[in-house]
Image (cartoon, rainbow, N blue to C red):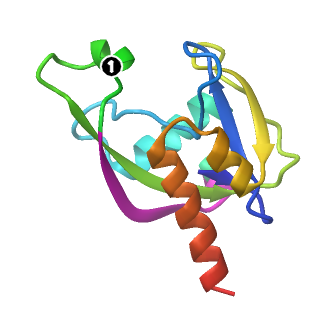
Amino acid sequence: MIHDVDKNILLLERSDKKGYWQSVTGSLDSYREPLFDAAKRELKEETGIDADRFELKDWNIARHFKIFRHWAHRYPEDVKFNREYFFSILIPKDLQIKLSPREHSSYCWLNSAEAIERCFSWTNKEAIRDLVKHSSSSK
């Protein structure tokens, strides 16, 4: 989850599914790739953001979800579920975003309520809620 100091959320529109907005997502390159390294790599590939310039936070939260039918072809036939791990990064809102056109066609900054409404994935919605809840309780 990419956010600014005011908890505005950066969402990306998928190139292969117009109207499908999400945060950065991705997969391990191999079973040996550490999750943190995969998160940094996917962030750089999808947005051009170098996580080493900011603090990438591992929330130690994972959610198990059923793979959407329209993306099932990406997985072996017997794989029906996936596990998503939650990371967040605080960046300046004016930081230049460089999308990977193969993956995303546009991006926008939204407040948390608008971002929850726009995300198609329930796991993204929950991640935004976690981010907001943690921010409120730490004040």
By secondary structure, the bulk of the magenta-drawn segment is best described as: strand
Which residue in the protein does label 1 denote? 69
In the image, is residue 2 above or below residue 18? below
Q: As drawn, which residue projects farthest toward the right?
A: 94
Quarter the C terminus occupies: bottom right
Q: Where residue 75 sits in the image (x, y, percent)? A: 24, 20
Q: Is residue 39 magenta?
A: no
Q: Where residue 17 sits in the image (x, y, percent)? A: 56, 16
Find residue 79 and report its image quarter. top left
Q: Residues within 10 Å of mark 1 (few under 14, many from 20)?
A: few
Residue at point 74%, 31% (across, down)? 107
Residue 104 in view in this figure: yes
Q: Left or right: where does residue 27 sit relative to residue 132?
A: left
In the image, is residue 139 above or below residue 18? below
Residue at point 59%, 51% (across, down)? 1
100 vs 61, nearest the viewer: 61
User: In the rendered structure, which amino acid carries the disc numbered 1?
Assistant: Arg
Residue bounds of the magenta highlight: 52-65
Q: Where residue 112 sits in the image (x, y, percent)? A: 70, 56
Q: Left or right: where does residue 77 sit relative to residue 8?
A: left
Q: As drawn, which residue projects farthest toward the bottom?
A: 139
Residue at point 34%, 56% (across, down)? 62
Report how many numbered discs are placed on residues in the image: 1
Element class at badge 1: helix
Q: Is residue 54 magenta?
A: yes
Residue 49 in view in this figure: no
In the image, is residue 24 above or below residue 56? above
Q: Where residue 77 sits in the image (x, y, percent)? A: 15, 16
Q: As drawn, which residue projects farthest toward the front?
A: 117
